[in-house]
Image (cartoon, grey):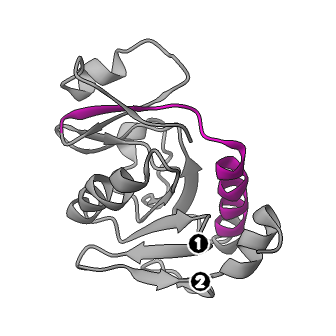
Amino acid sequence: MGMATKQASVATIEELLALPEDRLRHELLDGEHVVTPAPVLLHQAILRELFDTVQRALRGHDELIVFWSPADIVLGPKTLVQPDLFVVRKKPGQRLRKWSEVGVPVLAVEILSPGTAARDRGTKRRIYQRAGVAEYWIVDLDARLVERWRPEDARPEVLDGALVWHPEGSRQPVMIDLPSLFHSVLGDP
């Protein structure tokens, strides 16, 4: 993903949502308007692999739905985020029709790029923790690891082998072999 830029012209979620479509990712992070260009190919390749892996693992869990951005996830009066990948929980029989209906994700995933790393590890992490996102994964392609954060964490759990996620209420954990995941996209180290 290219360098993110800051825009001072937007101060509310309503103003953000009224912007014309420009194929960029617009977020409002605690009142700060941030614009990020389209992601690079490797970012999208790992996103596709993660989506496929999580989607397969959640088969049979009709209450959990996997999405990817662009998406407008509101986590506060001045906070609209677009996680690269996220999982939401819906009520039995509920049909989600608008982003405003998804609530707080149970999982949010951001894939690092040079232009977003500081924000993903700083501002966005604090936003996800404060909002009560049960799991926040920061995927570091260069280091071939995942930093896992939970709401109460002061430091991440750093994973480079198996990533095991137990979504609340699910019978089976989601298990991801990280070396295989990274190899499928990046090849040999």
Which quarter of the image is occupied by the C terminus?
Answer: bottom right
Tag of residue 160: 2
Asked if the residues shown at circle 1 and circle 2 are in contact, with their CB atoms under 8 angstroms apart, the answer is yes
Mark 2 residue type: Asp
Residue 76 picture location, percent across and down: 20, 45
> Farthest residue in the top direction?
20
Q: Nearer the viewer, residue 186 or 60?
A: 186
Q: Secondary structure at mark 2?
A: loop
Residue 62 picture location, percent across and down: 58, 64
Q: Is residue 40 visible?
A: yes
**Magenta-colored stretch includes residue 26:** no
Residue 2 picture location, percent across and down: 54, 37
Q: Is residue 120 above or below residue 34?
A: below
Q: Is residue 86 visible?
A: no
Which quarter of the image is occupied by the N terminus?
Answer: top right
Q: Where are the magenta residues, as a range?
A: 31-54
Q: Secondary structure at mark 1?
A: loop
From the image, state whether disc 1 or disc 2 is nearer to you: 1
Say whether residue 85 is left or right of residue 72: right
Residue 148 picture location, percent across and down: 43, 76
Say whether residue 112 is left or right of residue 176: left
Q: Residue at x 61, y 64 (%)?
A: 141
Q: Nearer the viewer, residue 114 or 74?
A: 114
The residue pinned by badge 1 equals 143
Q: Residue at x 58, y 72 (%)?
A: 143
Q: Residue at x 53, y 42 (%)?
A: 69
N-terminal of the pair, mark 1 or mark 2, is 1
Q: Nearer the viewer, residue 133 or 90?
A: 133
Q: Nearer the viewer, residue 64 or 178?
A: 178
Q: Residues within 10 Å of mark 2 (few under 14, many from 20)?
A: some
**Magenta-colored stretch includes residue 32:** yes
